[in-house]
């Protein structure tokens, strides 16, 4: 009868006690919190990649701003600059009829992508669309961006301030300020 009594006690004590159950839940909670923190930190680890893409997009856009005329009233062939030495005042108004960057002929055309609603501004442009217009490779890499460009002429200075803001889907915004001088 002894062996039967021994196996009977083992069977009765083979369950999980309340202390073991609570201890197991506490360990599981600690592991889940650790895993949660790991996954929450993942987007921050990718942030430098997005910042690099935002900078490359802003750089390509700033090259376009530098490539166009300062103002519609400038006449480079006659070597006349608007508002200087009695020449016609600067127009300081956009002339582009579309949001395609190839139609932008003067700096003020970039006001079209400003969120202030002034001078016919339509608001931000999608990063993938802009990357395609700038002929950047792999345009799908820029789909998480929104770009805003605002042009502010200053009557007391010989330049226009172009502010380029690149917003990343995660909420970060990189701002760049470009001064476009009245050269041509």
Image (cartoon, rainbow, N blue to C red):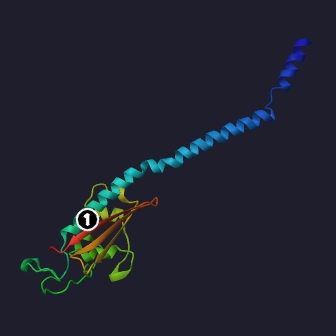
From the top left corner, tell me how far across and down residue 91 is, in percent: 22, 84
Indicate left or right for 178 with 11 as reference. Answer: left
**Residue for point 26% across, 77% down:** 108
Instruction: Please tell me which residue lies in front, 127 or 71.
Output: 71
- For the N terminus, which image quadrant? top right
Q: Is residue 32 visible?
A: yes
Pick out the residue farthest to the front.
Answer: 156
**Residue for point 73% across, 35% down:** 23
Instruction: Name the residue tied to disc 1.
Output: 62
Instruction: Please tell me which residue lies in front, 125 or 75.
Output: 75
From the top left corner, tell me how far across and down residue 96 is, in percent: 26, 78
Determine crowd level at label 1: few under 14, some 14-19, many 20+ residues with C-alpha closer than 10 A: some
Check the image and report above or below for 174 versus 22.
below
Indicate left or right for 37 with 179 as reference. Answer: right
Instruction: Please tell me which residue lies in front, 139 or 174.
Output: 174
- For the C terminus, which image quadrant? bottom left
Q: Is residue 134 visible?
A: no
Pick out the residue farthest to the right.
Answer: 1
Quarter of the image where one finds residue 129: bottom left
From the top left corner, tell me how far across and down residue 150 is, in percent: 33, 73
Check the image and report above or below for 91 versus 57.
below
Instruction: Please tell me which residue lies in front, 76 or 35.
Output: 76
Q: Secondary structure at mark 1?
A: helix
Quarter of the image where one finds residue 14: top right
Quarter of the image where one finds residue 89: bottom left
């Amino acid at each position: 009868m002894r062996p039967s009594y021994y196996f009977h006690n083992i069977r009765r004590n083979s369950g999980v006690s309340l202390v073991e159950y609570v201890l197991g839940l506490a360990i599981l909670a600690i592991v889940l919190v650790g895993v949660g923190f790991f996954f929450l930190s993942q987007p921050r680890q990718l942030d430098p990649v997005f910042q690099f893409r935002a900078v490359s997009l802003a750089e390509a856009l700033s090259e376009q701003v530098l490539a166009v005329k300062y103002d519609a009233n400038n006449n480079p062939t006659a070597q006349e600059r608007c508002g200087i030495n009695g020449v016609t005042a600067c127009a300081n108004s956009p002339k582009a009829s579309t949001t395609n960057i190839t139609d932008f002929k003067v700096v003020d055309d970039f006001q079209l992508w400003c969120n202030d609603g002034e001078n016919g501004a339509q608001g931000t442009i999608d990063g993938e669309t802009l990357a395609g217009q700038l002929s950047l490779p792999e345009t799908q890499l820029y789909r998480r961006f929104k770009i805003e460009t605002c042009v502010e002429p200053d009557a007391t200075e010989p330049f226009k301030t172009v502010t380029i803001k690149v917003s990343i889907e995660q909420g970060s915004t990189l701002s760049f300020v470009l001064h476009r001088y009245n050269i041509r």
